[in-house]
Image (tube, rainbow, N blue to C red):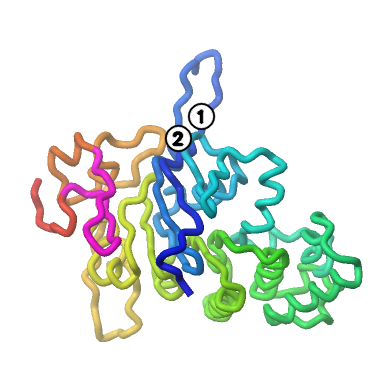
Amino acid sequence: MRSENQVLLETKDLRKYFSGKKGLFNLNPPVVKAVDDINLTIHKGETLGLVGESGCGKSTLGRTILKLIPMTSGQVIYNGEDIAAYDKKQMWEMRKRMQIIFQDPYSSLNPRMTVYDLVSAPLEVYGIGSAAERKEMVISILNDVGLDKQYLNRFPHEFSGGQRQRIGIARALILNPEFVVCDEAVSALDVSVRAQVLNLMKKMQQKRNLTYLFISHDLSVVRHVSDRVAVMYLGSVVEIADKQDLYGAPLHPYTRALLSAIPIPDANRKRNRIILEGDVPSAYNPPSGCKFHTRCPYATDRCREEVPALRDMGGGHGVACHFPGDFSVKG
């Protein structure tokens, strides 16, 4: 259950920039601001959904928080400590508390390792328990994710996509972490299997008091699993709010456009689809001012010149827009 008062993780001005390679005719290679000044707070026990178009920096943000890739600058405060300054030894211990579930359950599992080897590997790396104790722990976590011990000696190719993702979840949770980044954890699964895996993840969250950063481009899935939702565009968070507020009354034009694309299961109801003009700008050369102004039908000269700050509009509803909630064409 989400704790309003206990902050587990916080990012402050977090940045991750990628530079191109220098060459004879390229002395000043372009820089991609994949993660640009991200400030997020995640409470213990909650699920923060992170949504946006492909290439907006969602996965890069998740991996930067975990220090799977080095950050350019900023802070990641975990239980009051800045892990950005941790050395390898300190991060070695921290990784028991922070784990990740990858998108593709097949490519993330070594095809030459059995289920037992895959799930028990973290225990062996950290020297936890005897061989007999590790086997019991593996059997226990497999039971939790809905797999029988008869699968211990089988290989990944012998399983369906949903079963492979259950193995990936078991491997991520075997060390009893507190915080888990779910990087498009169900996007590679059939629609019929997604609900089962999502329900499993919610069940494991309640049982183990887990905190999730749930990354997805599917707003329907995010609405089902999240307590709060953050929307990213070209490396920046443009809106963040409780899911009821964000889905019920979005304040940013980009969020509004994304929500208009969610299919309605009732064939007799129609949603007014908002079609964004133009393509997503190049991350190598983002627009000046508001990054969204080149596709925003409500943009003004101020939007083209001035970068909007992420402002709290009340109740924890933050939005980076000069005219939040004003969806009237200004020109």
Mark 2 nearby-residue class (10 Å; few <14, some 14–19, many ≥20): some
In the picture of the structure, the residue carrying the numbered disc 2 is: 32
Whether pointer 1 and pointer 2 mark residues with C-beta atoms closer than 8 Å, the reply is yes
* Residue 205 belongs to the span the image colors magenta: no
Choose between 98 and 59: the one closer to the eye.
Answer: 98
Q: What's drawn in magenta, residue-wise?
A: 307-322
Residue 217 visible in the current orientation: no
Marks 1/2: CA–CA distance: 6 Å
Quadrant location of residue 104? bottom right
Taking the view exactly as shown, the residue that stands out farthest to the top is 24
Residue 290 vertical placement versus 108 (above, below):
above
Q: Residue at x 19, y 34 (%)?
A: 305
Where is residue 265 shown, x and y percent of the image?
A: 35, 82
Q: Is 83 displayed left or right of 108 in the figure?
A: left
Please give the label number shown on residue 212.
none
Disc ID at residue 19: 1
Q: Quadrant of residue 110?
A: bottom right
In front here: 167 or 22? 167
Q: Secondary structure at mark 2?
A: strand
Q: Earlier in the sequence, mark 1 or mark 2?
A: 1
In this rendering, is residue 14 above or below 237? Answer: above
Q: Of residues 319 and 189, which is closer to you in this image?
A: 319
Residue 255 lies, with reference to residue 21, above or below; the image says: below
Magenta stretch, main secondary structure, is loop
